[in-house]
Image (spheres, helix red, strand yellow):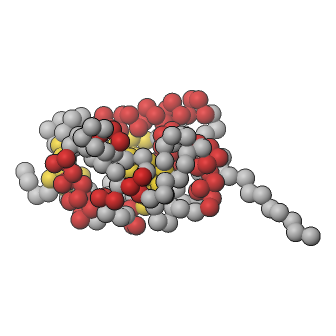
Amino acid sequence: MTTLQMTTPAAGFHDPVQQSQRAFRILLDTMARPGRVMDQDFDCGHPGGIAPVLAAGLLTLADLDTPVWLGEGLDTPAMRDWLRFHTGAPLATGPGQAALVLLDAARMPALDVFSLGSDEAPERGATLLVQVPSLHAAAAAMTWRGPGIKESVAMPLCGLDEALWRQRAQLSAVFPRGLDIYLGCGRQVIGLPRSTVITFGEA
């Protein structure tokens, strides 16, 4: 006789109403103030290997109408079960069909595989949640300018290849199409809206 073992997905928000509202406020604030590190002052359940701040972001942004794509190293049975159980979000068949994407900085694909939206519907550009090793370490390597930034802010690469950042810099030419990006480490997050212009080496 075979015994079936059922695995319960990891917990999500402990207080769904309050924590989802707080997580959403953090996401809004990070996009309103690009480059500023925001701290999530609460924890939430999540599968192993994902930063709590990005888990909260997934629980807040994913729903039945939001196709999610899980990047290399994060597309695990535990992650799929957790996402399905807590959000009901469908899994996208490929990165170009996803509205919401979870990625690891060490295994990033080129940005052109994701949807940038269209001229008629730029809001359909994907939102990327990227897990990075640090938001503070290393010297500044680029400059961000745009709405929500007073003059400019110097930024490190945050564990991403410079080539990838240069791809992102080129996307300014297609604005308002583009990608909204969250960089998360532990309980800290930085927002990078598509309106932010990135330059290298310029004063």
Image coordinates for residue 32, horizontal then vertical, percent: 30, 34
Instruction: Using the image as rendered, state which of residue 83 and residue 147 is in the foreground.
Output: 83
Residue farthest left in this picture: 203
Q: Please provide percent x and percent y for residue 6.
A: 78, 58
Q: Is residue 167 above or below residue 149?
A: below
Query: Can you name the residue that lies furthest to the bottom here?
Result: 1
User: At 19% from the left edge and 47% from the top edge, which residue is drawn?
Assistant: 174
- Residue at 44 percent across and 59 percent down: it is 94
Task: Please indicate whether residue 101 sits to the left or right of residue 160 in the image.
Answer: right
Q: Nearer the viewer, residue 128 or 30?
A: 128
Whether residue 61 can be seen here: yes
Q: Quadrant of residue 202?
A: bottom left
Q: Position of residue 82 (x, y in %)?
A: 62, 51
Q: Residue furthest right?
A: 1
Number of labels in the image equals 0
Vertical comparison of 106 with 198: above or below: below
The residue lying at 28 percent from left, 43 percent from top is: 118
Query: For residue 49, what is the image quadrant?
Result: bottom right
